[in-house]
Image (spheres, rainbow, N blue to C red):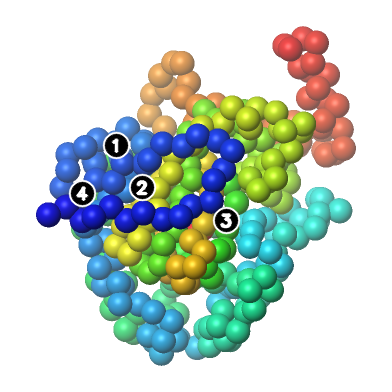
Amino acid sequence: MAKEKKTFDLKEYPFPTEEIPRLNIDNPETEKRIAAGLPVVITDSGLVRSALHWDLDYLQGNIGDGKFTVYKSKNKKFQYFDDKKVDTFKDFEKPMEHLDLTFPEFVKKLKTAKPGKDKVYLQQALNEGVGKRIVADFLGFNWSWVTEQQKKNKFGALTSNLLLIGMEGNVTPAHYDEQENFFAQIRGYKRFILFHPDQFKCMYPYPTYHPCDRQSQVDFDNPDYKRFPKFKDVKGYETVVGPGDVLFLPMYWWHQVESLPDHGHTISVTFWYKAGPIGNVVYPLSPQQKVSMMRNLEKMIHQALNNTDEIPEFMQNMVLGRYT
Ligand SMILES: O=C(O)C(=O)C[C@H](CCCc1ccccc1)C(=O)O
Ligand SMILES: [Zn+2]
C-alpha cells in the first residue's frame, strides 16, 4: 500500500510552483532525471540510513567536544555571506552572526531561544574531528549508491558533507550553488522551493564581488517589484523532504530552504560534488553555461576596472540604448 501523501500547511508565495517528483530509488525515471540535471526527491535510498537515529542527545553524546560553526540571526533568515568579500563592501551589514560553539552550547541556545528572539543554525562540515560512533554512522551511509551516481553522471570530487541543524522556521533565502548536491534529510521537515537556472532574469542575484554573491536580492516575504519587476513572472518547483528523503539538487538551480514551522528542529546532511569536466560545447549554450559566462565576464570587468564604483556605469554604458 502506497504511503499516504503527507500534507503540510505551507505559507503561500506570490508565484506558481509545480511539485518536484518523488520517485523510488529503483524507478528508472530517477536516474533519468539525475542524468538530465533535473531535481528529484529519491525515496528509500538508504543514503543516510545509519544516521536516522540521530537526535540532539545522541549527537551531543557522540559528536565530540570541538567547536562548531553556528549562525545566529535576529529574524528567521540565514542569508549566507562570504567573509572574504566583506571588506570590499564598506557599508555591508552582516545578515547573521557567526559563532563558534561547543555542541552543548549550541543545544542550550536552540532549546532556550524564545519565539521571535535570536534563532540559531548549526552548519558544520563533518570531518575527522567527530567521535568514533559518528564516524561509524558516517561510514554506514550508502556510499556505493551515491558514488555510483557520481561516476555515472561524471560529477567531480565530493567536496563536503555539511551537517545542518536548524530551528523550526529557519529560512535559507534563495540562492544557487556551483556544485551538484544530494541533500539528505535525517530529522524534521524542510520545504524546498526551486527555480530553473533560466529564471536568472527574475532572481536578480547580487553582483559577483558582493559578499552575498549567488544569493537573490529579492525578499520573498516582501518583494520590491519596482527594483525587481521580472520577479512577477517567476515560476518554481517545490517539495517537502522528511526523514530518509534525498533531494537531488542540480548545480545552478536556485533554491530557498525552510525548516517547517511547528515541526521541530531539522537535521540534514549535504553531499556536494564539484562539476565534472566540461566536455565538448553544444550550441545553443545552456542556461547554466550562460550563468557561468556572466559570472566570468563580471569578474573580468571588476578586475580590469579595479574599482567597484565604476562597474555599474561601465556596464550600463555598454548596454543601455545599444542592446536595449
Ligand atoms: O544544501 C544546500 O545547498 C542548501 O542551500 C541547504 C541550506 C543551508 C545551506 C547553507 C549554505 C548556503 C550557501 C553556501 C554554504 C552553505 C539549508 O538546508 O538551509
Ligand atoms: Zn544551497
Residue 61, horizontal then vertical, whole percent: 41, 90
State whether residue 197 is above or below residue 74. Answer: above
Q: Which mark is residue 248?
A: 2
Left or right placement of residue 17 versus residue 43 in this view? right
Which residue corresponds to the image point at 78% horizontal and 25% vertical from the top-left?
A: 315
List the residue tagged with mark 3.
Answer: 172
Left or right placement of residue 309 versus residue 131 in this view? right
**Measured Cα–Cα span from mark 2 to mark 3:** 17 Å
Which residue corresponds to the image point at 44% horizontal and 16% vertical from the top-left?
A: 283
| Mark with earlier residue (3, 1) | 1
Asked whether the residues under the numbered discs 1 and 4 touch, taking CB atoms below 8 Å apart as contact, a structural biologist would say no
For mark 4, does the 10 Å Cα neighbourhood hold few (<14), some (14 to 19), or many (20 or more) residues? some
Task: Give the secondary structure at mark 3.
Answer: strand
- What kind of residue is marked 3? Thr
For mark 1, does the 10 Å Cα neighbourhood hold few (<14), some (14 to 19), or many (20 or more) residues? some
- What kind of residue is marked 1? Arg
